[in-house]
Amino acid sequence: MLALADALREDASALIKTIQSLGIKILMVTGDTVDTAKAISHQVGLGDRFGDATRGLATPLQFDGFANFYPEEKFRLVQSLQRAGRIVGMTGDGVNDAPALKQAEVGIAVQAASDVAKAAAQVVLTHPGLEGVASVVSGGRRVFRRMLTWTITKIARTVELAALLTFGYIATGFFVTPLVLIAVIVVLNDVVTITLATDRSWVSSSPERWNVREIARLGGVLAIGWLILAFVILWFALTRLQLPVPQVQALMFAYLMYSAQATIYLSRTPGRCWSLLPGKFVAAATIGNVVLATVLAAGGFLMAPVSLVLLVAMLGLVLLIALLLDQVKIWLFSKNREEELRQC
């Protein structure tokens, strides 16, 4: 008697655990018999609850895998999971896997896949094994986090600038920041925005979705916090320090630059703003903007000169308020997570 078996990769079990640690449920789908599927599943650390086309397609999430599946049944399984509200990733190598690979949100063709499977997939692995799958997921979540940072920052800065110019003009009768300085703010902040593509980013341990309400709420809270401080500084400069209007405008220019850089760090992670160090380009751009804004305001370039002591004091106040807003941000993220868990 000659026994034949497909040899498993030595790293298969560890890679499956890595993928599961990212909050992904793994289902084995094979055309082999149930006994063969259970034997392989046991070796890689998956469960032994296997369904078939007769009783598995209606409730696919109750099983750990499926055996005796034909190509059209793999396709219907993907559709069933999608109807259940799941984002589906599918790996395959053969021509018969092509329909399911095409239907899945993320079709992944393995290294030795047929040309048809590669053409149907959205991702083609260039190395053997499943390590590429974990890299794809982690990379996607890093991109998502960078996009989220940009979105929250954009909302906060836009609301802050628009409200400060509007209500500041109504309250004082002059633009708290002249148009030429607004142009400088936009250009310098765009430099930081470009560097966000290279930033270190936090990878979530569970799948993420766009939560417009959470994003708008956090961006709005940050904007309101900075606006309150802006009007306090504006009031203090006009009534207590009795600065002339050009100096007040220069002071508010520096304030808008300082708060914009702080907003970047507040929106990068749901935890403490210092828990994840920024990328070197983001750090260089934000620190450079703070230094440049201080030099411009203190030196009187394009604006009236402002006392360096006053600028440093205002920068310290911005950092203090940033710590307070960071605590509010953490509370908002934890509250949103609790709401998501209750809905599950």
Image (cartoon, rainbow, N blue to C red):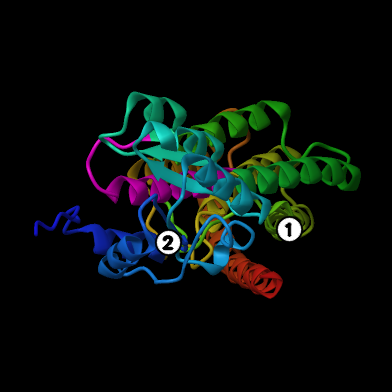
Magenta span of residues: 124-150
Q: Residues within 10 Å of mark 2 (few under 14, many from 20)?
A: some
Is 271 rendered above or below residue 179? Answer: below
What's the distance in space between the residues labelled 1 and 2, CA to CA?
26 Å
Whether residue 199 appears in this view of the structure is: no
Measured along the vertical axis of the image, is residue 56 above or below residue 334? above
Quarter that holds the N terminus: bottom left
Q: Quadrant of the C terminus?
A: bottom right
Name which residue type carries label 2.
Leu
Q: Nearer the viewer, residue 199 or 97?
A: 97
Front in this rendered view, residue 259 or 238? 259
Q: Tell me the residue that label 1 is attached to.
A: 217
Mark 1 surroundings within 10 Å by alpha-carbon count, few (fewer than 14), some (14 through 19), many (20 or more): some
Apparent side of residue 68 relative to residue 126 in the rendered image (left or right): right
Front residue of this view, candidates 340 and 273: 340
Report helix, strand or loop for mark 1.
Answer: helix
Q: Tell which tag, 1 or 2, sits nearer the viewer.
A: 2
Amino acid type at image mark 1: Arg
Tell me where residue 34 appears, x and y as whole percent: 38, 63
Residue at image coords 47%, 62%: 25
* The label number, if any, that marks residue 29 in the structure image: none
Q: Is residue 239 left or right of residue 298?
A: right
In the picture of the structure, the residue carrying the numbered disc 2 is: 22
Residue at left 42%, top 57%? 67
Disc 2 secondary structure class: loop
Q: Position of residue 334 (x, y in %)?
A: 61, 72
Q: Indicate yes or no whether the magenta region holds residue 17.
A: no
